Structures are given as structure tokens and as C-alpha cells.
Amino acid sequence: MVKIVAAGLTALFVGASPLAYAQSPSTEASERLSVVDWNKLTDLRIDLVKAALQLTPDQEKYWPAIENAIRNRAKDRQARIAKLVETVGKRSDDGSPVETLRNRDPVNFLQQRAEALAQRSADLKKLADAWQPLYRTLSPGQKQRMAALTIFVLRDMTDAVEHRRLQSDDED
């Protein structure tokens, strides 16, 4: 049971930690983090996880696939956010908010949302598949460090989401 929880939390950490900071569709979000900043954050996340694991030489052979999956997932996330920012920007240029809502196509919205979720699902599956061989080789100490890191990151994510919610409430 502990192994399943640790694996799930590890996947959640690696896959979701930047989401708390990345989901704002406003143009302010795109101004806050450039592509270079996103890449630096991804590099830091990768370095943090690798440092926490303290991989053995035998385990190192599994790491490139995990790093590649993390980077591809981050790149796809950046593309989705850029598309969202562009879409929101176009809608705000089209006229008043009431007019925008009147002309909204709910079927198109559902299709776009389904495509985005399918991409996220595929990326997460690739990440889980990349982690599986390495996870089998982790020692109990490595699994414990990952669990501790995951708890720390989840707490940080919760704080970031709460901060964004409060900012949103303040703007309203």
C-alpha cells in the first residue's frame, strides 16, 4: 500500500507541481514567465527530483527516459497555455464580455477541452511508463525521500493555488 501511495504521489509531484503556477489564462501569466523561465523551472524540478533520489549507477540508466518525459510534458503544457492565452486574448478583443458570451460555441469549447485533456492524459501516461522501471529499483530510503519531497511540493502547490484564488477574489 505504501508503495502505491508513494508511486502515486511521485507521479503527482513530477506531473503537477508547476500546474499551480501555470493555469492562469490571463496575459499577466504569460508576462510573468517566459519560455526561458519555464525551461529553468523544468530544469530545477528535474534536478530536485534527481538529487532527492540519489540514484545509483545501475539506476542512472533509467533516468534519461524520465527526464525526457518530464521535458516533453512541460513543453506540451507551455504550448497549451500559450494557446489558451491567445484564445482568451482574441475573445477579449472581439467586443464586450456579454457579446463574447452570446457568440460562444459550447460544442467547440467541449471539443477543444477534450483535445487538451487527451493530450494531458497521453503525456501523463508517458511519464508513468517512464517512471515504472526506475521505481521498481528504488530502495526504501529513496522511496521515503520521494514521499517527503512530494509532501513538501503538495503543500507548496496548495499554498500557490490559495494565493491565486485570493488574487482572483481581490480582482473581482
Image (tube, grey):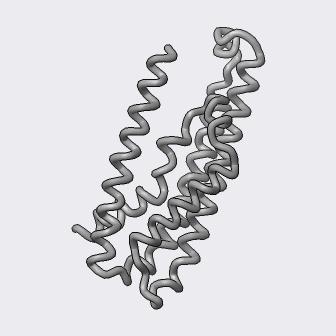
Residue located at (53% from left, 71% from top): 66
Q: Quadrant of the N terminus?
A: bottom left
Residue located at (63% from left, 30% from top): 28
Residue located at (75% from left, 12% from top): 95
- Residue 125 seen in the current view: yes
The residue at the far left in this view is 1
- Residue 107 seen in the current view: no
In this rendering, position of residue 10 left or right of residue 172: left
Residue located at (57% from left, 70% from top): 67
Residue 100 place in picture, x, y as percent = 69, 15
Vertical position of residue 158 compared to residue 72: above or below: above
Number of marks present in the image shown: 0
Vertical position of residue 19 compared to residue 135: above or below: above
Residue 137 place in picture, x, y as percent = 38, 83
The residue at the far bottom in this view is 58
Residue 143 place in picture, x, y as percent = 31, 72
- Quarter holding residue 86: top right
Work out whether residue 5 or residue 24 is closer to the camera in this orientation and state it.
24
In this rendering, position of residue 5 left or right of residue 117: left
Residue 168 place in picture, x, y as percent = 48, 23
Work out whether residue 117 or residue 52 is closer to the camera in this orientation and state it.
52
In this rendering, position of residue 57 left or right of residue 140: right
